[in-house]
Image: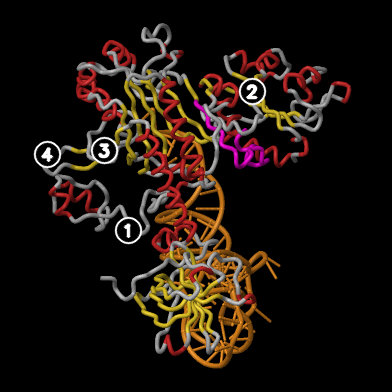
Amino acid sequence: MTASWQRTHTAGALRAAHVGQRVTLNGWVHARRDHGGIYFVDLRDRYGITQVVLSEEVTGELRLGPEDVLSVSGQVVARNEANRNAERATGDIELVAESVELLSSSKVPPFEIIDELDTAIETRLRHRYLDLRRMPMLANLEHRSRLITGLRNAFVGQGFTEVETPILTRSTPEGARDYLVPSRVHPGEFYALPQSPQLFKQILMVSGVDKYFQVARCFRDEDLRADRQPEFTQLDMEMSFVEEEDVFAAWEKALGEVFKDVVGVELPLPFPRLSYAEAMERYGSDKPDTRFAMELISMDEWAAGCDFKVFQSVVAGGGRVLGLLIKGGAELSRKQVTALEDVVKTYGAKGLAWWKPASDAQGGGAGPLARFVNGQADHLMEILDAEEGDLAVFVADSQSVARRALGELRVHLGRERGLAKSGSWNFLWVTRFPMFEESAEGGWTALHHPFTAPEDWDMPGDPGSLASRAYDLVLNGWELGSGSIRIHRQDVQARVFELLGIGPQDQQAKFGFLLEALEHGAPPHGGFAVGLDRLVAMTLGLDNIRDVVAFPKTASATDLMCQAPSPVPEKLLREVHVASLAPSADGPAAESAAADGTP
RNA sequence: GGGGAUGUAGCUCAAUUGGUUUAGAGUGCCGGCCUGUCACGCCGGAGGUUGCGGGUUCAAGUCCCGUCAUCCUCGCCA
């Protein structure tokens, strides 16, 4: 049986065609307009807003407040020409109420449930249920659902099988800090929440699943950013008997379909490929925003022989002098240039040299570098492809600092000067990442992870110059995902562990289960994972993934709505054999008291 | 762990150089009036630990120190 209050239509459904029908709508009181003898209520639900007309006979003693939940029954009536609301989809009609039932009353909300809200994020998060009730937020959630469904269908359509992997798993070394879960049954032992399903999906390949995917929640106990939450969602996949191009093709097909169906954009396929080495040299970044040019310019050759001692010595010392040409940048004030210098200093550069170019005939330009130009202005302008009215900026430092600093400055300028075309979707595969990077302790660490295949199975020469078969997918300067072809050969895996300084015992202790699996007939395999929060945010034009996560955490990893994390009763800690080292609510004395063994 | 920004009414903000009253405005809320509004209008009203704790001063929303929270960010994030 249908309850008397149950809706026949949603608040966004009624049109002129419904005129004359008796309907029931359910929803929230969005706005009230009391005109004495006539009373208007805008009734809102996820689908839209419908104007309800109430008379005193219908409302009686009922006083309606904002966000009260109503069921309204009555007749759909056409509005006359003067009373139509062209702004609203339901604006041609209104519901003349014959009965109203208050299903639930609401306290006055701490902020209005409107589309354009400028309330502090803190307040929105504290009352997230109200924030999410706003149309744009509901639309974000819906978009997210449609996009994930689209990807699911796309991978299923390509013969992939969705498999769930454990949330309670074991801690693995390297990578991000793990979230730990103490074991009640095994005193002193802990589960870890997965940073990704990496090892499980490789084992699924050994199992013969052949094509796996999963919408996987991942957990990393690291500090947050606008594009980083401690728990996030990946579309994770892995394939057997494949090489890079097979993985790329699977994703290009899936993303092509989803962008067409959900975003309404026809992506040009295939996506361009760019090697890591080229990305770093041209853009100073492994996730270049290729919506605009302004590439880094190598000044090494000129700098080595120039009169500016700082440049000379950096090049002589094995560093780089890199430049960036800001078209029309000569208009920038000294203050604005200083602001650019602050940007590069953030990333470790010591300073930003600059030059406003002019030909030798015109006096050789201006700026602190001008006095070192000495009749080479024409030559420099050629290297820089500069003309009068431009601004050239330079960083001289180690290659990594110079690249990073100017790479970030490039992105900064791209944003500030509006160089990136909005509405363009520059997907890019960045390939051939280095196999290893030098660790702080002087050894090697895996740049991707230790199961990434080297480009050459024999791994000749210097570990630092080895290329791997790891790749990233970049969209408009955001790293959307990464993956690799994995090592399926035991001898190669052993060699990689050796280079990483992980001895046989450690290998067994930490990854024994994977290594054993790899010894039982592992197919060549590789895979990829895309950060869905970022993808959803980007396709909505948002620069913070908070707005596409229903219940996000703050920068200090707290949930302002449910107040997580929280202390737990001593009893619960005892059950899982855990004692806290944190100063207790009783004050810091408690810690030393506990250490003393006194109660 | 470091840097920067912010914190005043439910919400968004103002309050000059430390000194004009009872810390204001808009909006929301409450009450009254109004039969065609849809950002309704008009009249009236309630609403404040200036994040918190110290300090300087005759006097602190304003200056100093500490602390907390939120945002951005460096480090971190295989």
Q: Secondary structure at mark 3?
A: loop
Give the foreground label among 1 and 2. Answer: 1
Residue A200 vertical placement versus B52 (above, below): above
Q: Name the amino acid type tagged 3.
A: Glu
Quadrant housing residue A408: top right
Of callouts 2 and 3, which one flags the residue occurring earlier in the amino acid sequence?
3
Q: Secondary structure at mark 2?
A: strand
Q: Name the amino acid type tagged 2.
A: Leu
Give the foreground label among 2 and 3. Answer: 3
Q: Residue at x 68, y 40 (%)?
A: A417
Name the side, left or right, on which A299 lies relative to A3. Answer: right
Of callouts 3 and 4, which one flags the residue occurring earlier in the amino acid sequence?
3
Q: Which residue is mark 4?
A: A186
Q: Which residues are magenta?
A: A410-429
Question: Disc 2 and disc 3: Cα gap in Å?
Answer: 47 Å
Using a 10 Å C-alpha cutoff, classify the residue at mark 2 as few (fewer than 14 neighbours), some (14 to 19) or many (20 or more): many
In this rendering, do the residues under marks 2 and 4 share a single chain? yes
Of callouts 1 and 2, which one flags the residue occurring earlier in the amino acid sequence?
2
